Image (cartoon, helix red, strand yellow):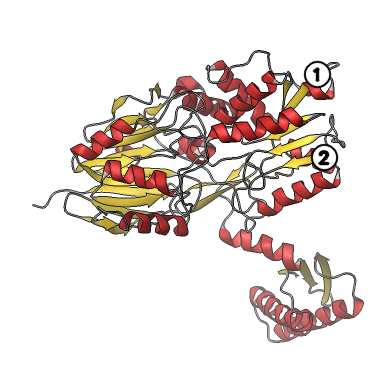
Amino acid sequence: MSEKHLEIIPLGGMGEIGKNMFAFRYADEIMLVDGGLAFPDSHMPGIDLVIPRIDYLQQNASLIKGWVLTHGHEDHIGAIPYILPRLPRVPIYGAKLTLGLLKEKLSEFGVKEADLMLKEVTTDDRIKLSKYFTVDLFRMTHSIPDNSGMIIHTPVGRIVHTGDFKLEQHPTDGKPSHLSKLAQAGAEGALVLISDSTNAERPGQTTSEQEVASAIEKIVAAAKGRVFVTTFASHVHRVQNIVNIAEKHRRRVVMEGRSMVKYAQVAQNLGYLSLKDPLISTDEMGDLQDEQVLFMCTGSQGQPMSVLSRLALGTHAKLSLKAGDTVILSSSPIPGNEEAVNAVINRLYSLGVEVYYPPTYKVHASGHGSQEELKMIFNLVNPKYFLPWHGEPRHQINHARLAQALPNPPKRIIVAQNGDIIRVNKDEFKIGGKVPAGDVYVDGLGVGDINDEILLDRRTMSEDGILIITAVLHPEPHVELVSRGFVRTNRELENSIRGVALDVIEVGMREKRALEDIRDDMYSAVRKFVRKVTGRTPVLIPMLVD
């Protein structure tokens, strides 16, 4: 009998940036890694968040033995509050900050800690998860503390999963990556390497946080008035550096924005953020002068309701920007957010403030390793097989090419998609099937009640409007039209549409056709006519009243 296979099943994070989630299955056991969300792109009007589809996990719920979290970023833990109620209660392992951020998120959903099995671990722990899965964690520097990679010991061999990482030379917290653990795994024999592909197209090494801090400090030192800084709220290392800079230049740190305040409070309470003076809000500023304050605020992605966007538009209830202010955008736009960020930057310029943003100024660095760092990891692990992960197809493919060009390339590389079942043992590494995978949309309080068909309708309405046709059949057939976003009042066009609809209704009534058939014929005829006359295809809603 041939050796059994381990199945590696990405449910998110393959071919995309965001909603990272893995299921590892051997025999009758499943181990989960992460449960992240993604933010909607411009083709998803009205959608708030995107989370992974977990049909496969629900169908095999009894096999799930535990959940291991790499770190506390939204794209790795943000979907858990939505997913957790649909899965069995199993141990969830994470480092102190990761679990602290997760608890904060779950509390907003009314989930009590007593109802969970949260297991705090360090980034150097061994987790005996189940009969077939043992996990050795190892610290990897990233843009948030308590970030782990993992060596997953399975009956078929060692699987090395880097997690998100950059090989930071001067980590803010003084804690470097545990590269010795990677080297040990490589020396003992690594079957598969799963590695972060985000910056696989970028040559060299990723800019250090120390360089970013130096660039920000020069700007703050030269600023005469108020300073506003926006960055990712979860970028605790960056937040700490900015706090240090503010304190050095005798500025009080004012926090604005719900997520910024929430993350800072959790990080401070758990000992990951140190401050000489307490953080204050705008209401607590008192008589501080302009040169005595530094605001940290939300809005790094141009979100419409964020603090920076409202400041740029002049709609903030308590603050307004003025000439002499300095604004630093210490972040890069997530793909799809470029237009929104550029709009905010242009608006800031028009207000007469000084604006600093990447790549023009070195005020941001990626949290992901570039090509030289990816090569170093690969050479340390020296895997038999390679699975590039955490990236769009171009990132995965360029990571694969990078690995192939090394002196000791892997025997096989798979550029996988979400839902692929990657079957592996010491002799095989192949895609052996597919599980349901894809996007589940979160819109307001609804989870999964929006599908691609509804999004298509939304896009169509935003592009061509909506036309509602109500046909009353008795006593005499007549047609009423209501349109929104279609055309401005045009009596001639409206009368023509009524005429087309009435012709279909009269024929249908003479032939004594079913009401549903008359309605469908009216829909087809009006749609064809509108398309021919206007070149548009509005969302068309036909209704018959008998």
The earlier-in-sequence mark between 2 and 1 is: 1
Left or right, residue 20 beside residue 217: left
Q: Is residue 539 visible?
A: yes
Q: Quadrant of residue 528?
A: bottom right
Q: Nearer the viewer, residue 495 or 170?
A: 170
Label 2 CA crowd tier, 10 Å (few <14, some 14–19, many 20+)? some
- 146 w.r.t. 490: above or below: above
Q: Position of residue 459 (x, y in %)?
A: 67, 62
Is the C-beta separation of discs 2 and 1 under 8 Å?
Answer: no
Amino acid type shown at disc 1: Met
The amino acid sitting under disc 2 is: Val
- Label 2, on which residue? 353
Please provide percent x and percent y for residue 476: 84, 77
Residue 17 versus residue 362 in the image, above or below: below
Residue at 70 percent of width and 48 percent of height: 341
Q: Which mark is residue 432?
A: none
Residue 400 at x, y percent in the picture:
36, 56
- Direction from residue 103 to residue 364 in the image, left or right: right
Query: Which residue position holds label 1?
Result: 285
Q: Is residue 56 visible from the viewing direction of this image?
A: no
Mark nearest the camera among 2 and 1 is 2
- Which element is circle 1 on? loop
Query: Height in image: 450 above or below 248?
Result: below
Mark 2 lies on a secondary structure that is loop
Q: CA distance from mark 2 to mark 1?
A: 21 Å
